[in-house]
Amino acid sequence: MTNKIGKVYLVGAGPGNIAYLTLRARDLLALAEVIVYDALVNPDFLPFISRDCALLNVGKRGGEASTPQAEINQLLVDLCQQGKLVIRLKSGDPSIFGRINPEIQALKIANCPFELVPGISSAIAAPLLAGIPLTDKDLSRSFTVLSAHAPEILDWEALARLDTLVILMAGRSLPEIVEQLQQQGRTDPVAVIRNASRPDQEAWFGTLANIVEQTVGVSLSPAVIVVGKVVELGWSFSQNPSANLPLAGKTILITRAADQSSQFSQLLQAQGAITIEMPALEITPPSSWEALDTVIANLASFDWLILTSGNGANFFFERLQALGKDARALAGIKIAVVGKKTAATLKKRGINPDFIPPDFIADSLVATFPELLSSQKILFPRVESGGREVLVKELTAQGAGVIEVAAYESSCPREIDLEAWQVLSQGKIDVVTFASSKTVRNFLQLIEAAGAKNALSPKFLLKTLAIASIGPQTSQTCQELLGRVDIEAAQYTLEGLSEAIVRWSQDSRDR
């Protein structure tokens, strides 16, 4: 038992796409010490949480082993009594078919503080995203939300008299739902919306007479079914809201750090792509803080601080804070950064860099440095395993005194992400993206190891997909290790890489 008072927040994660996560939910995720989440919650919420947050999956999926509700209840109580700030993250809204009541009762009995945080339910979001308004002054004066988890216990005679039905957990029960409503004389239009709000959202429009035939052989989980005349208002919409976007139908594999932001995924999804994120880097503290602590104790002796990555910036300032200091310790020191992303990381901390090279690459920093380098003492916090050797060599050649210290480490994950391997080995990837040379090297290491177990060579795995690079240095590594580069960003940013992929896709269609 601890003297610290814990608290449990029962939070709705929305229909799937993190764009529909509430601001309150996002803020709480950043503070969470433990997140207890359901199977249908989108893993893209991970960028919002801290490195030290524990993640516990207790999801329930039909036909699969799941955590008993009593165990979940006790887990929440135990964590709260340990003084933890706990997020119980549920898909949609926690109060709509979310088994919230037994969890609340368990917390009440144990005198555990808790708070309810609403989310956007798929019952509301899915119809609207398919172009269907649930109410209309002529077609629907009301709508009813129901679960088809156990359709045999529902009063179909009463339900058939209602204007509009919104049915959740109904993918496996569609034939029985149709039969029950037809027996009550209904002949309505029907829409089935699968994966609402996500890039691979699909919708089937029909009637009770033909909707089962339209969806035969298709897995309809997770899906929302709408029955009623208002469905007619959605018929003019495409079955896939992303169908007219430039990357519609493209599946893109993103190699990234395991706990890094999914900003790039969101950029590509906004253009209609389906994205698969493959962790190719694990970002951790350095093996020792000694060197960094020493230079932080002597910051006043430096003229410039150079930061070439968001990771370097974050670890440097986190260590500064851990030593009881803040940005005031940098008074009199100028800061140079490479790239907009690194600059944005600083701005989140209320700091504007003094210099950003125009080409967003390290080589440009030396060529355009605003002061005579021969008189400068420079602090360069970087990855422990080395990097930016050319930058350090050129700075030193210009007469600068450069002190390199390890601020963090990046390494290759032990094994490839299972979902990424499945789609890659099945030839379902259209583009693989690289934002650094290290992700290229680690990607190759991971697919070589996985391929050796399955008699699949890297050449075979890469033969049908395009290789996309963020800039010249990464492209050079792609050429050396993978044999080619098909797409290179003109502007060396994630936005620039996204634009390059869009241009490639459009050019491919024109050929």
Image (cartoon, grey):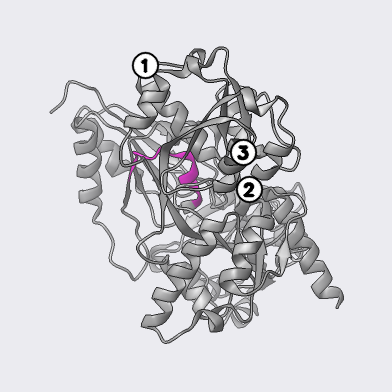
The image position of residue 281, as x and y in percent, is: 45, 54
Which circle, 1 or 2, is nearer the viewer? 1
Above or below — where is 171 with respect to 213?
Answer: above
Image quadrant where residue 414 sits: bottom left
Q: Amino acid at mark 1?
A: Gly
The image position of residue 405, as x and y in percent, is: 43, 35
Q: Quadrant of the C terminus?
A: bottom right
Kindly identify which residue carries mark 1. 324
| Residue placed furthest toward the right | 510
Give neighbour class at mark 1: few <14, some 14-19, many 20+ (Cα, 10 Å): few
Kindly identify which residue carries mark 3. 397
Residue at image position (49%, 44%) is 47
The numbered mark, 1 or 2, whose residue comes first in the sequence reads 2
- Which range of residues does the magenta coloring cover? 44-54
Above or below — where is 487 with respect to 57?
Answer: below
Residue 225 visible to an observer of this rendering: no
Residue at image position (42%, 18%) is 298
Q: Nearer the viewer, residue 37 or 426?
A: 426
